[in-house]
Image (tube, grey):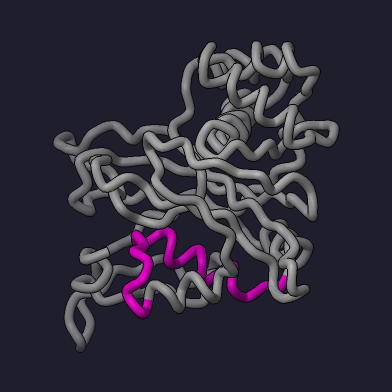
Amino acid sequence: MTSEQPVPIPAATLVVFRRAPDEGPAQLLMVIRSKALAFAGGMAVFPGGRVDEEDHALAARLVPDGDHDEIAHRIAAIRETLEETGLAVGFRRGCDAATAARTRETLLSSGSLEEAMARNGLELDPASLTPFARWLPLGLAHGRIFDTRFYLADLGTGNVEITVDETENTRLFWITAEDALAKADRGELSLIFPTRRNLERLAQFADFASARSHAEATPQRIITPQIVRTEEGQALTIPDDLGYPVTREKLSSAMRS
């Protein structure tokens, strides 16, 4: 990282699985980011956002002797998903649609997840999130750089009443990883490089249990894409030993995304 590059911003993303109504492959929750946003505007992504100071403070209170940074990232993934979609995932007891709506309303008005939980009788369960990957794209022409940890969570057949926040995002939808990739290939969805690679990796699994087992068995290192020269021209590559079935893409198409 050169001195000219901005300091990476800690962030967390949650890949939420649900059982498909037709008993087919599991569906994933995705959002379309507003085109007005500087980072990934108009792109289809998983819910998530930056880790803030309150996430760290809450993590320190929850686990005084634990890994505060890791727990803060999990809290951020849970909080951002609730803020952006209205979906309450990562809480210790089941959360019905009415409770989720009230909790989200309190969170948005107060800005405090801890207060929102206290008012609605909820308790965090960070352990229910499974670490999946950590991406830190450097030097890829973005004005901001995010150091993003990806997590997996299982909704099962629970509350699926979701509502877009209408600020950062313009649309919410459930889709299989395979269908998301097919839509992107047809030009119906726009994907940034990390999202496409993660969808390809997730498309290998029919359900949450198999994806979780894979994540738990796969080594995790920070993934920083590199530009390399090939016979076909420049390509953007990632390591080939971290569970990704596709590890390179022509630089021209990767940067168009």
Residue interval drawn in magenta: 185-206
- Residue drawn at the location 76% of the way across and 32% of the way down: 91
- With 109 as the anchor, is 167 left or right in this view? left
- The correct choice, above or below, for 68 with respect to 256 in the image is above
Which of the 4 quarters of the picture holds residue 197? bottom left
- Residue drawn at the location 57% of the way across and 65% of the way down: 175
Q: Is residue 230 visible?
A: yes
Q: Residue furthest right?
A: 93
Q: How many discs mark residues in the rendered view?
A: 0
- The correct choice, above or below, for 145 with respect to 50 in the image is below
- Seen from the viewer's position, the closer of residues 84 and 221 is 84
- Residue drawn at the location 14% of the way across and 36% of the way down: 4
Q: Is residue 64 visible?
A: no
Q: Is residue 120 magenta?
A: no
Residue 75: image location, x then y, percent: 62, 29
Which of the 4 quarters of the picture holds residue 242? bottom right
Residue 189: image location, x then y, percent: 37, 66
Q: Residue furthest bottom?
A: 231
- The correct choice, above or below, for 162 with respect to 180 in the image is above
- With 2 as the anchor, is 63 left or right in this view? right
